[in-house]
Image (spheres, rainbow, N blue to C red):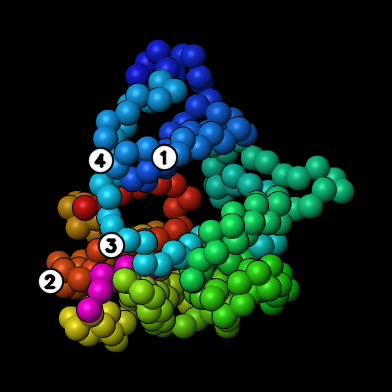
Amino acid sequence: MSSPPEAALSHPLAELTSVSPTEAVVHHGLEVRVHRDLTPDTDYELEGFSFRTLPDRGELLATFATVNDVHFGEEVCGVVEGSNVGPTFRSEPGDDPYPVVMNEGAVAEIRALDPAAVLVKGDLTSNGTADEYEAFLAMYGAAFGPKMHHVRGNHESYYHAPFAAVPTQEIVLPGVRLAMLDTSVDGLAGGGLTSDQVAWLDALAVDSDRPVLVFGHHHVWDPASKERSRAYFGIRPDDSEALVDVVARRPAIWGFFAGHTHRNRVRR
């Protein structure tokens, strides 16, 4: 999908954010425009954007939602330690902290979907404190109850927080199997996987009667990269290769979905 130059000039804040078989969503600053009742697998020109809707996947069997990097307890957005790149933002005095505002919005959107499961994949807190974790549970746990599944991220493991360190989790829904891995390593910002976790995923995928989607906090290292550092910010190279090997030999696995980097990126 692409946006022609003239569209960028006429709508400098416009962004095509998602496309499904029957819908397309365009953001104009704070305004959200949803184009519904589109035809699957069809080319469209809408609001200056060129795109093709996804093919029809058949009957909807289940709906689930996933979020990450919810950072309860954080006060300033956009801080990169050791760098002054980009602006930073904070709530005005007396206003709710911005993580509360953002997560209230996320919870409202997810509840509207009425999902069968909600996966929160790491960085539940800012500083790994019990109070921040309780604030996370008070919002997401209260909203979704047993349908909510979560795992720690580097903002927990870096501070040696004891909670949400569950090595593996499996959630079975109609038409799909969700597998969540704890990719965090105690005391580190980077991530990793144990041989037991990799073996668990391999065994789960080999006999799965439905597609497997895998979730974790840290992203996978690029096997094509010339750099191979054990201090890698994502899943360390050796462990990433072990995970990639499982995905390569188990066609039931359709993808690995991570947070951590605060940006959108796809690797194949």
Q: Nearer the viewer, residue 7 or 55?
A: 55
SS label for mark 4? loop
Query: Given the image, on which type of amino acid does mark 3 rest?
Result: Gly
Comparing labels 4 and 3, the label whose residue is closer to the camera = 4
Whether residue 252 appears in magenta in the rendering, the answer is no
Q: Label 3: which residue?
A: 255
User: Which residue is depicted at the point 26% across and 35% down?
Assistant: 42
Q: How many marks?
A: 4
Instruction: Tell me where residue 171 appears, x and y as whole percent.
Output: 41, 79
How many neighbours does mark 3 have within 10 angstroms: few (below 14), some (14-19), or many (20 or more)?
A: some
Near-viewer residue (248 or 161): 248
Q: CA distance from mark 4 to mark 1?
A: 13 Å
Q: Please tell me which of labels 2 and 3 falls first in the chain.
A: 2
Q: Please give the residue where the numbered disc 2 appears in the rendered image.
A: 249
Indicate which disc, 1 or 2, sits on the residue closer to the N terminus.
1
Is disc 2 placed on a helix, strand or loop?
A: helix
Could you tell me how far apart the alpha carbons at marks 1 and 3 are, in whole angstroms? 28 Å
Residue on which disc 1 sits:
37
Give the CA distance from mark 2 to mark 3: 13 Å
Q: Which mark is residue 41?
A: 4
What crowding class fits label 4: few (fewer than 14 Cα within 10 Å), some (14-19), or many (20 or more)? some
In the rendered image, residue 212 lying in the magenta stretch gets the answer yes
